[in-house]
Amino acid sequence: MEIETTGIPGCYVLQARLLRDRRGSFIKTFHTPRFEELGLRTDWREEYFSASAKGVVRGMHFQLPPVDHAKMVFCLTGEVLDVVVDLRRGSPAFGTALGFTLSAENGRGLYLPTGCAHGFVSKAEDSGMYYKVTSVHAPEQDAGIAWDSIAFDWPVSDPELSDRDRRHPRFADFETPFVFDAAKAAQ
Ligand SMILES: Cc1cn([C@H]2C[C@H](O)[C@@H](COP(=O)(O)OP(=O)(O)O[C@H]3O[C@@H](C)C(=O)[C@@H](O)[C@H]3O)O2)c(=O)[nH]c1=O
């Protein structure tokens, strides 16, 4: 596993080693000693996956304090354009939205620190997204901002959305509780 920095402090592209043989491929998505070496969190509390049809948008999601969490995501089937927005007041990247193509083919994942919103658009007929998060699901603190209220040029204009995702506040109206701490950017 190698990591690449992004324009959002503490948010990293995870480049897993993709091993191929005549049966198919093998990708390791998490290795405790390697994550510790890289200064990333290893205290994952839940994992889950979802499948999305082409053109579906999910997001932009995060959990509110005190049950906010770091998150890591990989795309196991299909392909997504994965999107991250920095919601941390005082961050040099506050409000910055970045997109990353994740697929089983490229073996790329994303590590998001606390204080970032996450979403994606599915670019394939069946995109499977796999997550780990550092706190358990808390429905009351499970929050979001509207996918189309961020500074990001989505490749879709009228995507399939959940009812919940239609109701999120706009980024400009969201009073963020997250504060940037440079010493803990990846936490
Ligand atoms: C996220 C989550 C949802 N659920 C339930 C709530 C609901 O009935 C059903 C589907 O939930 P959602 O509509 O929130 O699923 P979804 O829109 O796929 O939510 C996901 O979106 C992406 C962008 C993320 O970043 C993830 O962390 C997660 O928030 O699953 C849980 O029971 N536990 C969980 O951890």
Image: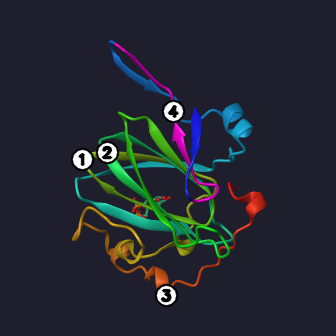
| Residue at position x 27%, y 60% in the image | 56
Q: Which residues are magenta?
A: 8-21
Q: Amino acid type of disc 4?
A: Ala
Q: Which three-letter amino acid code belongs to the residue tagged 3?
A: Asp
Residue 16: give its label: 4
SS at badge 4: loop
Q: Label 1 amino acid?
A: Ala
Q: Which residue is mark 1?
A: 124
Which comes before the other along the chain, label 1 or label 3?
1
Label 4 – label 1 distance at C-alpha: 21 Å
Q: Residue at x 31, y 64 (%)?
A: 154
Residue 176 location, x and y as percent?
Answer: 60, 79
> Residue 173: where, in percent of width, then height?
49, 87
Identify the residue at horizontal 22%, vertical 53% (top origin).
54
- Label 1 with label 2: CB-CB less than 8 Å: yes
Residue that carries the numbered disc 2 in the rendered image:
79
Q: Which mark is residue 173?
A: 3
